Amino acid sequence: MDLSTKYLGLTLASPLMPGASPLVDDLGMVRRLEDAGASAIVMHSLFEEQILSEEREARLLESHRESHAEAASYLPDAGIFPLGPDEYLEQVQRIRRAVGVPVIASLNGTTPSSWIEYARLIEQAGAHALELNVYELATDLLEEGEEVERRVLEIAEAVVGSVSIPVAVKLSPFFSSFANLAARLDQAGADGLVIFNRFYQPDIDMEALDVLPTVHLSDSGELLLRLRWLAILSGRVRASLAVTGGVHTAEDAIKAVMAGAHAVQMVSALLKRGPEHLRRVREEMVQWMEEHGYESLAQMRGSMSLVRSGNPAAFERANYVRVLQSWRA
Amino acid sequence: MDTPIRTTTIDGNEAAASVAHRVSEVIAIYPITPSSTMGELADEWSAAGKKNLWGMVPRVVEMQSEGGAAGAVHGALQAGALCTTFTASQGLLLMIPNMYKIAGELTPFCMHVAARTLATHALSIFGDHSDVMACRQTGFALLASGSVQEAQDFAAIAHAATLKSRVPFLHFFDGFRTSHEVAKIEELSDEDLSAMLDEGAISEHRRRALTPDRPVLRGTAQNPDVFFQAREACNAFYLSCPEIVRETMDRFAERTGRSYGLFDYAGHPEAERVIVVMGSGAEVAHETVDWMVARGERVGLVKVRLYRPFDVASFAAALPQSARAIAVLDRTKEPGAVGEPLYQDVVAALSEARQAGAVSGEPRVIGGRYGLSSKEFNPAMVKAVFDELSRPAPKGHFTVGIVDDVTGLSLPVATDFDIEPDAMVRAVFFGLGSDGTVGANKNTIKIIGETTPHAAQGYFVYDSKKSGAVTISHLRFGPGPIRSSYLVGKASFVACHQFEFVNRYDMLEHAGEGADFLLNSPYGPAEVWDRLPLEMQEQIVEKRIKLHVIDAYRLAREIGLKGRINTIMQTCFFAITGVLPAEEAIGKIKETIEETYGKKGGEVLKRNFEAVDRALAALDAVPVPATATAERPRPPVVAPEAPDFVQRVTAVMISNNGDLLPVSAFPVDGTWPVGTSRWEKRNIAAEIPVWDSSICIQCNKCALVCPHAAIRVKVYEPALLAGAPESFKSCDFRASDYAGFKYTVQVAPEDCTGCSLCVMFCPAKDKANPKHKSINMEPQEPLREAERENYAFFLDLPEPDRTRPRVLDVKSTQFFQPLFEYSGACAGCGETPYLKLLTQLFGDRVLVANATGCSSIYGGNLPTTPWTANREGRGPAWSNSLFEDNAEFGLGMRLGLDSQRDTARELVARLATGLPGALARELLGADQSNEKGIAAQRARVEELKRVLSGRTDPESVRLALAADYLVRKGVWIVGGDGWAYDIGYGGLDHVLASGRDVNILVLDTEVYSNTGGQQSKATPLGAAAKFAAAGKEMPKKDLGLLAMGYGNVYVASIAFGSKDAQTVKAFLEAEAYPGPSLLIAYSHCIAHGYDMAFGAEQQKLAVDSGVWPLYRFDPRRIAAGQPALQLDYAAPKIPVKHFMRNENRFRMVERMGAERARELAAAAQRQAERRFHHYQQLATLSDAPPTGEKTGV
């Protein structure tokens, strides 16, 4: 069965790949993912904030240096622990050496200049493509939606203009006019759109009156939102599309491809069931496709998109109305 | 010299270690100030794969004590390896037994010693020769360096000479003055070292190794028939040793151009007055002699290099025949001797030389002491010695550098004697440890050393506090060589990096005429003058000092480098002094910033660059009026109500003038008053906690966690509020047994260090606005005056009745007065809350034996100390013996107390009939298990003393003296994990096994905190520490489990940040238990690498993850048929990595290699689970009483 796909200009053996996650911190895991059929390795994000916080930590350590006669320092020499993005960049190189499939790095910056700077460093480190993780909560009461969108566009434009590797933009669904933003990113030269980012949503500890950071894994139910937006964009933008969030089974993957995904990223399912789950999904996809007489993946890609499906209204508002009505009945 | 000379700018420790590491195969080490750096560097180099001359990476092993390190090198030498070790002071003493063996077996070996004072009436970490002098008899050759250059050169000479001579060498240099002085030196290359070492001699050493292929026996026991002769059999080696050293020095000179002799003479060829001295004192003497000779004086100096074996002929040859008066200077004291060791040697050598005809005249020889414990030794003092030699009857056995107004031995020293050339740039910087001043100055020296032909020197003086520590940097740059091994006197540049110092220290006493004074000031050029105290203005006017100001803190804040002003001040230094052209200086500063943060250092790098670029624009020259205008003098150092001793002695030390105190000011035996820290108001907190009584739940946890006893609680009768200051806060106390009482949480604004541990630990949040707690941090300065008054009022409120609480728990104990307060421990210290609690519970009736380490430093380092007494004058009596013997020391206290108590009881029994009523019976049968019982017994003892007061019969007199021992007294043995797990473990184990009633508190920071975070056996798996830079692979030693094995030891593992109630309970049970008790107390520490405000939170995570167990093992439960062990923690409920990821000691390992870090974290996870599982099973085991049937008896 031909599962091949083209994502971000890269020809891949299948659409299945791990999404950005801590899975790839471990080279052994990276190799297992490749063995299980991952067509690319997406790295977790290089967070500029993390670099800044490490720098602050380093300064904290410095504040105890050279202040007492008996000890010039209290930990082994920090000089051998370089700050900055070095560790991440080295991991890019290590993964490149460890696997044969393309390596897609991921970046979350804070200022326009730092996005460009780190994107260039990642390119130099040898990543085949770059995913921009525009992970930001617009909490400023005075900032208008247009400004938020402009910032996303500016970052994408700036990075696309400063590196020669393909660039994808990973977005959240929380934009008032998502289709328009996607189209403008497409025009700005983004090679791919990754939908959607899942925000870590903090919980509340009622006893201690504390906010608790929590991570809860996705389930297949979360896929539906993504299916709709894949379907809406599919065939209408030049950029290739990746789905992330809610893909757990072969059925999920098939639906995503039918909605228009060029790449299918999985995280929660792999965290729960291990990297080998990727192989099972692939095998079951092939089995389903054979049973249903498909010759290639390309055949089904976008078949259920807004443009091509027999029932475009289902993806639009009418769907909402009808479903509600049917539920009442 | 066929290769170009390479220079480097390093300190004496690094200079010696760089040679030792390259010429050794096995290095056994143990941390001790001031030599620790040598071991750390050796370990770091080996960890980084740096190879020795033979292409192998030396094996570095950290031992459990210096005794262990000496044993390990002895063994490695026997097995044919080339070895070295590094030590000082008490550590050197512990090596002495092995040194006799190594020398007796004629083993080539060289050790390096940063010579340090031995503890006598007091411990001192500073430099003198008392440790080295204690090794004279061992048979080691003693070779003395006097400078950083020599520390390197003599290290090479010693390693080479020991191979050829087979006499082991102790190479030493002065602790701190040389070990920590940073100087530009000419570097020895690997080729230089290879050329020095005799491969043939190395082969000989290998051939003597113990091996089953050529078995021999070494270390026999010998009898009177042969020991003596066999001991004399080594003589030839000692006789030839000086010649071998001379040859080695000659070869060294040929290769490097630096020429040394066994004794080096400097001065007038026909000198009449001559000083003999060794170590860094020889450098300052050399400088002074040159100056005096240039002024026509016939003076000279003999520098002693090879002190043992002492070569009489070489000494005689070095001494000019013209000498008629000789002063021999010893940097040690040998009470009761005819004179100090070098003096005695010189007198004997002269006598022998005269007999041999090598010396013709009969010079008068006097001996004197100088420089004990790094006491300053400067040209004025050298001059004073020469002046003394000019007198018709010079004073023998003098001292120089102090004022001895008791025995009158000291020489008068001129105060205004400066011989340094004007070409020498001399700079003094006053900073805080936390502001990076020292680090920046070290960089400055490197920059100047490496970019100019000038010589460069830096020396750094630290105060003894671990929080808010003041640093003073002394820098010199100019045409070399710099022999000035003393503090800068007449500086051409003085910098004050902290404005508040203008009110505390006489910084300009260091300034020369016309000096530049750079002041970091929140007040600009127009305003600053009026903010200076009168004394400082007068100095500025009088010395025509040029004043410059910069608001470096504001600039740092603007740039986003809050609190880090070092690069800003450094840039200003270069601009004002012009040591380098401005452009070049700025370029170089930026290079060092890049070296520190890496080229990709990101934001920090950019911000530091910005600091450099913006510094000069923010720098202003201040116009100085023709006369001083201030009316305000510097405020008094201590409050006027401080006791006389504090006014006369302590205050002088606080203001950095302790050098001026005469001998008569001091106790003769090292006994000092308690409770002095309260007089040193340090005001180091930027923010202090402020209490909101409306939210407070009155749990008293803030007081419990405060490391400095700077937040306190009291309950009191409402009437006592009369006369309270206006801003004094108070609320109703909500507890039925104190109905109608008032309650206050009060901060000591000037003693708080601002760590915010209390705020973090406070459980009371405003329900409508949870970020507002019952205590919140607010800027100190605006609150200082009012809170000072409030605190004084608070302290005057009566202390609570100790017998009143029905139960002793966290809340009730915090009303008890802490008798450990305002220590110099780090802000947020994790150890001191335990000590404070100990004093609240039992402080009025304990002796404390304190192992050397952090707790003995913040507990006993002058000028002011935290252990104090209550209103009745009772409090902990504290002493520090050594590092290694603390458990034994405490056991001795127990035995001493018991013996006194038994005497008192025996006398009460004997005199019982003569005592009123049932007094004797009650005294002997008293239940003293609680506060009530103790109070009652104290009353009986008072009654007894009253009865005895008129009596004169010997037994009554003796009883009156011993009566207080009828009140129960406890012994607490306190120390860190370095002591308990490593160096003192043998003794600790023995004391546990003794069954005696002592309480042992282990403040477990999981590293040697005081010496800078070296690993101990308490270091947890996966943590990086010095000597375990890649992360420790072995699990932490389970000290508690080992102690439980005895079955009769009370053991508890506690962590106040996790479960404070269990901590209090464990203290109470331990004290009540009539046998040995061991409390192992989790103590967060700056060596863990995170903000100490989170200390208690991390403790909680440590327990929740199972990394730190909470339990109590109480042997009393066995008799009741219960399991002795009770677990006070649940099965691990969070992953260990959630604990580890918040601390840099673990994160460092991750940064070095994620895979290895994950493996270690997984192993730590398994270890935590395994340990819980193991304890869980133990907690179900109760002793089945032995039965005859089962055992068949």
Image (spheres, coloured by chain):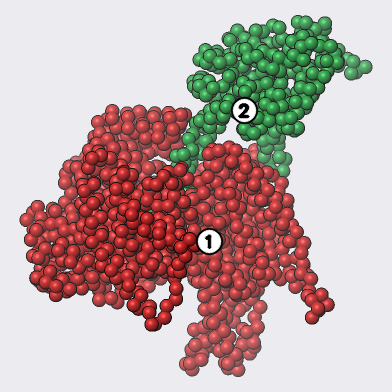
Q: Which mark is residue B859?
A: none
- Which residue, given by chain and number where applicable, does mark 1 sit on? B982
Q: Nearer the viewer, residue A293 or A225?
A: A293
The spot of residue B150 in percent (x, y) is 27, 52
Q: Nearer the viewer, residue B793 or B539?
A: B539
Q: According to the colouring, which chain is red?
A: B
The answer to whether B555 is drawn above or below residue B145 in the figure is above
- In the picture, residue B1112 is in which quadrant? bottom right
**As shown in the figure, which amino acid type bears the numbered disc 1?**
Asp
Q: Quadrant of the N terminus of chain B?
A: top left
Is B476 on the left or on the right of A57, as rendered?
Answer: left
The spot of residue A311 in percent (x, y) is 82, 7
**As shown in the figure, which amino acid type bears the numbered disc 2?**
His
Residue B886 appears in view: yes
Residue at image position (45%, 69%) is B217
Q: Nearer the viewer, residue B425 or B531?
A: B425
Residue at image position (61%, 61%) is B1039
Distance between the alpha carbons at the discs numbered 1 and 2:
43 Å
Q: According to the colouring, which chain is green?
A: A
How many numbered dots are placed on residues in this image? 2
Q: Which mark is residue A44?
A: 2
Residue B863 appears in view: no
Is B637 on the left or on the right of B217, as rendered?
Answer: left
Residue at image position (80%, 7%) is A309
Please, which chain is the residue tagged with disc 2 on? A
